Amino acid sequence: MRRILRPGHNVWRDDALDAASLLVDGDDYYRAFYESAQLARDYIVLAGWQFDSDACLLRGPEAEGAELPVTLLKFLNALCERTKELRIYMLAWDFHAVFALEREWMQELVFNWKTSDRLTFRFDNSTVENGSHHQKFVVIDGALSYLGGLDLCDHRWDTRSHKDPDPLRTSRGEPHKPFHDVQALLAGADVARDLNELFTARWKASGADPIELPAARRDFPRYSPKGAVPVEAARVALSRTDPHGLPAPGGECKEIAALYCDAIAAAERFIYIETQYFSSKEIAAALIERLGAACPPLEVVVVLNLAAETIKEEVAVGLAQARIIGELRRAVTGTPHHLGIYYTLPHHEGDHPPERATYIHSKAMVVDDRFLTIGSANLTNRSMGVDTELNASFEAEAPDDTLAQSIARARVSLIEEHLGGPVDIGNGQCLVDFLNERAAKAQGRLRIHPSPTEREKALLEVIDPDKLPFDPAAIEDSDEDRSIFASGLGPLWARLSGAKAPKPEP
């Protein structure tokens, strides 16, 4: 059994743990944060891609019976008022203007005005050109940490049932789409220390005065949140993408890209992937290479979004993803391997199917039930190169030890959520065949992903996704002189409008 985690290569830090679990979907994570933040006595640090002051942490009867406010900013301020020594530091990506209409305006004023002077919010623009800060983690009193794909912001809350409609799934009074994500809970002083080191380095790099955080609180209560999926791990590995290499500046690090490629190469039985996007040329190449090896036969399950969340995302990564899905399906044809690429529908009542799919925002991979990684990094070029990302990984020592068994239970739990029922596979039946059969018969919520569609194929004939500027693999990839059009503007216009393209000059 080839080891996957290799410190100094695909691992930044390898830390001891007191406990670990997965919090699947916003309902469980937001509740866990709300409860555990109330245990804080010294400090809370929060790093994220996005925060919203009015993000609602509790809903329904839980909110009605809460002693403290349930929206993010009022809740954090109430914690400062109740615990006089508590300090809270928030660090958010100073987003690009293209996101301005989607974000809460004047956030530095909103978070810092008329709140405790021990609550400090900062924007961080210390990214490379075309990059973003995408790490999402929380540390409480140096004892309890959260890390994954979820931000504490609007339009992220949902339950594992993903009911549609759900009167509780609203933001700012308006309903939003079903939404799936995963967050890791990590209990232990070692991992909290390393996350604090990363946070304080980024805080300083943002232009703020340096901060020092107190030593880990040894009497922090043991916390076991409702709905948590246990991961029986004694250690956790942290991996990064960071063009600046923080917390030690001066060196680019692409540990997450190496981590995914090494995990794929080491797979002997199956790979399970959840990702918001799949446009990474590097990861696709690693998967195609593994599918090119005849033995041992491999099962690959990928759960993706049916469609991009916005038009800019469709342009940014949709075409590259469509091309990769086509390449993967061609690569598996005629081999002993099995590939299933799916999207999932929300739970619905009645005879009419739901009008929209559940939005997949999670970033997770399981290999052979002996390796699990959860984090912020999508399978995109930018997540492997120019954005800052952070993943937590677990690897079993033996195929049937307690960690491997818990990884298997977590994987099955995720598949059952997407399927909407038990994974009752018959003896000798492969998982992909089982899921394909259920999807084809519309038994459950899982469906076979249609990409690349005829429209995507047509656009790929005239647009080269590698030359689009939105998903760079490296800093030097942004070459403004390159044309994105493979055949000029005429064929592109013809594909989009249905008009006849002008003939090229002889």
Image (cartoon, rainbow, N blue to C red):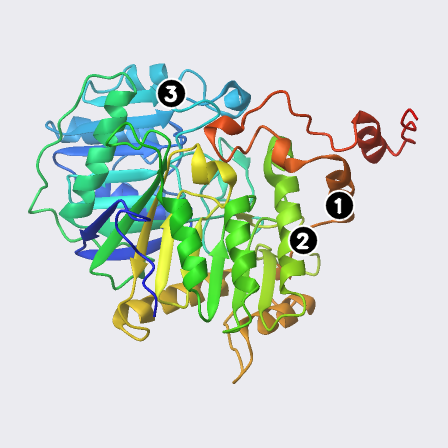
Q: Residues within 10 Å of mark 1 (few under 14, many from 20)?
A: some
- Three-letter code for the amino acid on which mark 2 is drawn: Gly
Which comes before the other along the chain, label 2 or label 3? Answer: 3
Relative to residue 20, is residue 466 depicted above or below?
above
Relative to residue 384, is residue 202 depicted above or below?
above
Secondary structure under tag 1 reads helix
x then y, percent, for residue 34:
28, 41
Q: Where is mark 2, residue-wise?
A: 326
Which residue occupies 20% across, 31% down? 79
x then y, percent, for residue 129:
46, 22
Secondary structure under tag 2 reads helix
x then y, percent, for residue 295:
51, 73
Q: How crowded is mark 2: few (under 14 residues within 10 Å), some or many (20 or more)?
A: some
Q: Can residue 77 be seen in this view?
A: no
Q: Where is mark 3, residue-wise?
A: 125
Residue found farthest to the bottom: 427
- Three-letter code for the amino acid on which mark 3 is drawn: Asn
Q: Are marks 1 and 3 in contact (CB under 8 Å)?
A: no
Relative to residue 461, is residue 83 depicted above or below?
above
Q: Residues within 10 Å of mark 3 (few under 14, many from 20)?
A: some
- Three-letter code for the amino acid on which mark 1 is drawn: Lys
Q: In which quarter of the image is the N terminus?
A: bottom left
User: Which image quadrant is residue 236 in?
Assistant: bottom left
Q: Do the residues labelled 2 and 1 touch (CB within 8 Å)?
A: yes
* Image position of 129 (left or right of 479): left
How far apart are labels 2 and 1 at the CA level? 9 Å
Q: Can residue 414 be seen in this view?
A: yes
* Image position of 243 (left or right of 145): right
Q: Where is mark 1, residue-wise?
A: 457
